Image: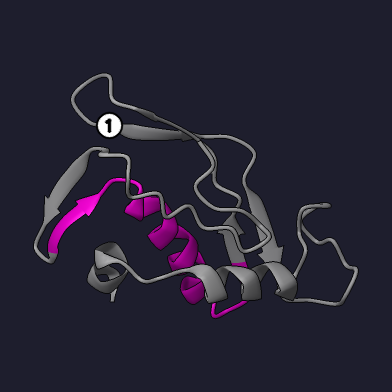
Amino acid sequence: TKYNGNNGFVNRNKSEKGPTIELSCGTVALTDFLHAFSHWSYIFTQNRILVCDLQGVLNEEGRYPRFQLTDPAICSRGLKGNFKYGKTDIGWRGIRGFLHSHKCNHVCRCLG
């Protein structure tokens, strides 16, 4: 499953009734953690990098569910054409796309 991309794509498919967890701020879909993680990575690095292009599967075996993600991308703010984190680092264009598409969720708000 593709959850978000380095081109501004954010999967908001709410038609799937996936697993949820109860937090102090409300009930959240486990997939909301992935979007919040991308958002958090940008805030935590003082708006310098965004971890995105998150795709993989939710492994629900065992006591605690966990995401197994493959092939993430990092978009960084730097010189144009400077692929600091590889060819999928499309810089400010990728960051701007995510920020434009992302809608903060309960997890984002819980993180502050």
Tell me which residue sits at (85%, 77%) in the image. 79
> Would residue 4 be counted in the magenta stretch?
no
In the picture provided, is 13 more to the left or to the right than 75? left
Between residues 44 and 18, which one lies in front from this camera angle?
Answer: 18
In the picture provided, is 37 more to the left or to the right than 84? left
Magenta span of residues: 26-49
Instruction: Give the residue number, with chain letter if any, for mark 1.
Output: 65
x and y percent of residue 16 in the render? 32, 40
Which image quadrant: the C terminus? bottom left
User: Seen from this angle, which residue lies furthest front?
Assistant: 15
x and y percent of residue 32 in the render? 34, 54
x and y percent of residue 74 in the render? 66, 57
In the picture provided, is 67 more to the left or to the right than 45? left
User: Seen from this angle, which residue lies furthest right?
Assistant: 81
Residue 64 is drawn in which quadrant?
top left
Residue 58 is drawn in which quadrant?
top left
Number of numbered discs visible in the structure rendering: 1
| Other-residue count near label 1 (Cα within 10 Å), few / some / many at <14 / 14–19 / ≥20 | few
In the picture provided, is 103 more to the left or to the right than 45? left
Tell me which residue sits at (54%, 53%) in the image. 4
> Would residue 39 be counted in the magenta stretch?
yes
x and y percent of residue 27 in the render? 14, 55
Between residues 12 and 30, which one lies in front from this camera angle?
Answer: 12
Secondary structure under tag 1 reads loop
* Residue type pointed to by label 1: Pro
Whether 72 is drawn above or below 58: the answer is below
Whether 74 is drawn above or below 78: the answer is above
Tell me which residue sits at (88%, 67%) in the image. 82
